[in-house]
Amino acid sequence: MSRRGAVTLLPLLALLAACSRGPDDAGANAKPEPVTPTAAPNVSVVVTNPKYQERATTLETSGKAQFNEEALARVHAPVTGRVLEVLARPGEVVEPGHRLLIIDSPDLGAAKSDYAKAVADVERAQAAHWFANELFEVKAVPEKEVREADNDYRKSVAERERAASRLRTLGIGADQLPSIASRADTGTRIVVSAQRSGVIVERNVTPGQVVSYGQSDTPLNLFLIADVSTMWVVADVYEPDVPRVRRGQRVAVTLPCCPHDRFEGPIDYISDVVDKDTRTVKVRAVVPNRGRALKAEMFVKVAIATGVGRVLTLPLSAVHREAGQTYVLIERGNDDYARRPVQLGAELNGSVEVRDGVTPEDRVVAAGSILLKKAAQ
């Protein structure tokens, strides 16, 4: 075959190849048309409208646990002296009268001496008063001396009571006063005891330490005794949310480690000062401390029940999640459905709060929507 004949056959062969392609090959590279979800045959679809329901509204924030200051006892040194022995340890549960430490103090010896002297002065003044009255009855002395004797007696009694009161503040009982008055008891050791029940949560004293009384505006806490059956929870509430908070509202406290354990109690204090740095107000609640789970300075999550509100809800079966998106199927017409993204809130009795995405007028597929999705694929 000549070169010219071969060139003539090439267009004919290309035409025959194009005619041999089927219709499937011609549409292989065509772009697919978008598919709108439609109801599959014999699929039962239930459509509903979003409904309003009432639920308790809460204000969620963070807070910190603290010891109940109204059930906290700070033990200070009642006298200046040297600690001889420490009788209690941190973590120990104590009752009123429990011995905490022993102090050797010259102040105690001086207080006992003052009381013994005051008792002797009362006895002397009483005798002088009686003798002056006897002399006045026989007109041996003027009335002026009787009045002076009576005044001296009253002063000595007041001084005796002052000395006795000082001893009582040092832990000396009334049964010990007679022996002190007779100078039979001149000891300088004083036992410091707990004044209320609780747990020793802090100890700042050791044997041999010198402690002082009345020499500082902020005396050292030798012991800190706390009643840990209840705790304070101090929460931070931002300025815009302050009007929603009232005294007496219930507070639910949870720990980050144990979100299912709740500690509940009422709000008993709302601060009148806004923190200039965080723009928050301190709100305090008293909660029972079951099992002593709450510890001082522990961070907690706080939910404040602020009342009852109306929220828009849908059945849980109407909500779908796919590829990180939450959506529902909206009925646009007969067998015509479309996806719509929604923003959800908390669950409520088989329903879920819908914060954004639908209105009460929308018709949402509540059942059969899974089959609709399959039919659309």
Image (cartoon, rainbow, N blue to C red):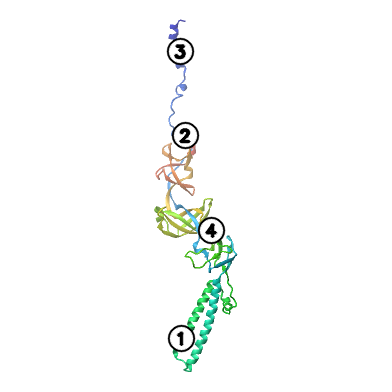
Specify the amino acid type for callout 3: Leu
Report the side of 194 relative to 3 (left or right). Answer: right
**Which one is closest to the eye, mark 4 or mark 2?**
4
What's the residue at 50%, 81% (across, down)? 157
- Distance between the alpha carbons at the discs numbered 4 and 1: 63 Å
Q: Earlier in the sequence, mark 4 or mark 2?
A: 4
- Distance between the alpha carbons at the discs numbered 4 and 2: 55 Å
Residue that numbered label 2 is attached to: 376
Numbered tag placed on residue 13 in the rendering: 3
- Distance between the alpha carbons at the discs numbered 4 and 3: 93 Å
Report x, y in % for residue 102.
58, 67
Q: Earlier in the sequence, mark 4 or mark 1?
A: 1
- Distance between the alpha carbons at the discs numbered 3 and 1: 151 Å
Report x, y in % for residue 54.
44, 52
Front-most of 270 and 120? 120
Do residues under tags 2 and 3 come within 8 Å of each other at their CB atoms? Answer: no
Q: Secondary structure at mark 2?
A: helix
Badge 3: how crowded within 10 Å, few (<14), some, or many (20+)?
few
Badge 1: how crowded within 10 Å, few (<14), some, or many (20+)?
some
- Name the image quarter holding residue 30: top left
Residue that numbered label 4 is attached to: 289
Badge 4: how crowded within 10 Å, few (<14), some, or many (20+)?
some
Residue that numbered label 1 is attached to: 148
